[in-house]
Image: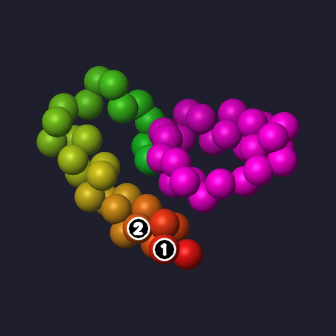
């Protein structure tokens, strides 16, 4: 299971296809690096339920 920004959706799909492995994944809005700590925390808060759900599936 991994978390990445939406910038990497196509790359993740291509890599999964190349490896023949499709891990659970959650994408959050891009970009990440120029966000404030509070903005990153909000992204995490918004994604946590989906992340936990995929970890326990």
SS state under label 1 = helix
**Quadrant of residue 25 within the rendered picture:** bottom right
Q: Residue at x 26, y 58 (%)?
A: 45
Above or below residue 7? Residue 2 is below
Classify mark 1: residues with Cα within 10 Å, few (<14), some (14-19) or many (20+).
Answer: few
Residue at (49%, 41%) from the top-left corner? 4
Q: Is residue 13 above or below residue 31?
A: below
Decide if residue 25 is on the left or right side of residue 10.
left
Residue linked to disc 1: 56
The residue where tag 2 is placed is 52
Looking at the image, which residue is at 75% across and 36% down?
15
Is residue 10 among what the camera can see? no
Boundaries of the magenta span: 1-27
Q: How far separated are the C-alphas under marks 2 and 1?
A: 6 Å
Which percent across, then down, holds residue 21? 77, 50
CB under 8 Å between discs 2 and 1: yes
Left or right: residue 41 versus residue 5 is: left
């Amino acid at each position: 299971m991994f978390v990445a920004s939406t910038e990497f959706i196509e790359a993740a799909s291509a890599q999964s296809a190349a490896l023949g492995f499709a891990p659970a994944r959650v994408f959050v809005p891009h970009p990440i690096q120029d966000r404030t700590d509070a903005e990153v925390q909000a992204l995490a808060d918004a994604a946590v339920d989906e992340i936990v759900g995929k970890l326990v599936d």
